[in-house]
Image (cartoon, helix red, strand yellow):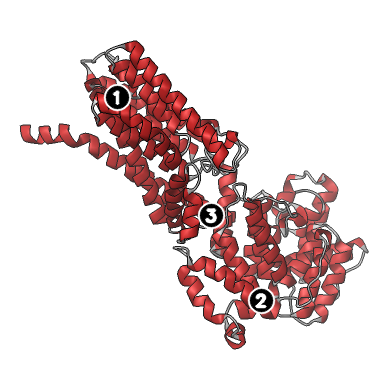
Amino acid sequence: MPIRMSLLSKYWKIGVSLLFGVVVFLYWWLVRPAMLSYQEQYQMFLMDGDYLMQLLSVPDGFARCIGEYLTQYYINHVLGALVLAVIFVIIQRLVWRLMASVSETAREHYVLSFIPVLSLWLMLGDESVLLTFAIALILALATMWFYEVLGKRLRVYLIILLVPLLYWLAGPVVLMFAAWVTIRQFQTADSKWTGLLIGALAVIYALACVLVSSWLVPYPLFRLFYGVDYYRFVSVYYWMILITMALCVLIPVPLDWAPSFKKTLWVGIGETVIVVGAFLLLRPSFYDARKYEVMEYDYLVRCQNWNAIIAKAEKKTPDLPMTVCATNLALGMNGQLGDRLFDFYQNGTQGLMPSFERNFSSIMLTGEAYWQLGLVNSAQRFAFEMMEAIPNYAKSCRAVKRLAETNLVNGEYEVARKYLRMLEKTLSYSQWAKRTMPLLGNEKAINEHPVYGRMRQLRLKDDFMFSDQELDKIFGQLLMHNKQNGLALQYLLAYPLLDRDVNKFMNYMIYVDGLHLGYRPSSCMEAVVFAYAQRNQRPPQGYVNEMMLRRFSDFVNIYSSGGKDAPQLKQYRNTAWYYFMGTR
């Protein structure tokens, strides 16, 4: 028993760290996997010497290099979650090592070593925080720990080497190291004034490194001070970066003066409650649920998991333009749009095709709808625009892959070859690029391909510009070009319904009937009944079933007597009539 207690007292800290790592792993794997996909698709790390030299030639380039390399693994959610779990545990253990190096008292306050990494966890609630910052933190903490294990005299001399080296490898986290040197010199130097002088020189030296680098690299001084690649938006300073850096320094330092509590168990419990409570209270303000909802829909669209999108919409009705667009696309791909159009919230024609916005986080989802319709050139334009709109000027594996596909379908083989060669240098897309390369110039193989052959059959061969306000005409042209384009058929009839333009819908319905496709979904039949009612007429015999006619008569009676707010109308909320009367 004494031996077991001794082992427990010796290894419980490691056990707690490992348990923390498991929690982090499960969180990113099961709760926020869409964030991993989101981060992975907005970068393209090339296994190429020129690209590596480009990264390493700027401050924080080494941290960015490691961060981008590890972010590639996010394409597999299990590996991505494992990467983050390992990084979080390393940061926590480094903070603990610093605490232990400051004072024996730190051994009674192990839980405090989790505060900086919890701050980082909160930071990652902002999708623009890049893994570069976490890697930079590890490099800075490791340098601070290395500084602690050196002898007092050797420390002073190595500052001359460590400061510029750390700055170039990890960026402005060098100021964190300089602050640590200042405080530790004051605490440990034989003369407090000498310690302060050395610390002040370290801070000045670090600032000088940042200033000198502004003459060597083409970045504004502001960006060099907050990190070239810590945050995706290059002109915004995210204040949590500074707070997390400060916590890495301030958590260990005061323990040198803290009293040694006798009731360490109660102290530990109290600190644990404070840390966990603060994290749980702050977390909702850092994680935007609606933003993550868009990410999840975008990921499912990327995977073309149409059933999962519909199931997700059935649990919680989407109400954002991009989530509504994804839901309608999924319904259309499953051939259910006409029957279930009004089962979900609709925000007009924007729910089919949102207006173009130069917003890198939404363009690709809209581009996917164009791609599935067969508007290959528009899908290509959206992919290119998405990549050009990325705030930190990075490339996108997802966009480059789509550009390779669109050029392959269009027969632009040399352009497609250029994009495929880029993807061959990546970790996650190289095998796909190698499998696709033999298709170049092979017309027979392309035409027989299940995806690219279908795109060639659906696409419009005449290249022309069109207005976002005339998309219904484009859907019509797609249908005229290929009557088997079921998605274009569904979108053609859904567009005037969502625009509440009954007359235009009837014109399109007559055209579709003339194609003898037998397409008469429930929403369209409801609109037909409504259109004939406006003319005080009855639909042709047998065109609409009697059950629907009786339901419409009941709807009209309820609406006439109680208005659009009548409670009984709720039973018709998934009908075209309910939508036309402006009740939703």
Q: Residues within 10 Å of mark 3 (few under 14, many from 20)?
A: many
Looking at the rendered structure, the secondary structure element under dot 2 is loop
Q: Is residue 526 left or right of residue 265?
A: right
Depth check: 251 or 477 in front? 251
Tell me the residue that label 3 is attached to. 43
- Identify the image quadrant of the N terminus: top left
Contact between labelled residues 1 and 3, with CB atoms less than 8 Å apart: no
Image position, residue 507 (x, y; %)? 87, 70
Q: CA distance from mark 3 to mark 2?
A: 24 Å
Residue 269 image label? 1
Give the residue furthest to the bottom. 444
The relative height of residue 377 versus residue 6 in the rendered view (above or below) is below
Q: CA distance from mark 2 to mark 1?
A: 66 Å
Q: Picture quarter containing residue 533?
A: bottom right
Looking at the rendered structure, the secondary structure element under dot 1 is helix
Looking at the rendered structure, the secondary structure element under dot 3 is loop
Image position, residue 521 (x, y; %)? 72, 70
Picture residue at 49% right of the left edge, 28% below the top: 207
Picture residue at 70% right of the left edge, 63% below the top: 381
Q: Residues within 10 Å of mark 2 (few under 14, many from 20)?
A: some
Tell me the residue that label 2 is attached to. 412
Image position, residue 141 (x, y; %)? 35, 34
Residue 437 image label? none
Image position, residue 289 (x, y; %)? 56, 42
Picture residue at 39% right of the left edge, 16% below the top: 197
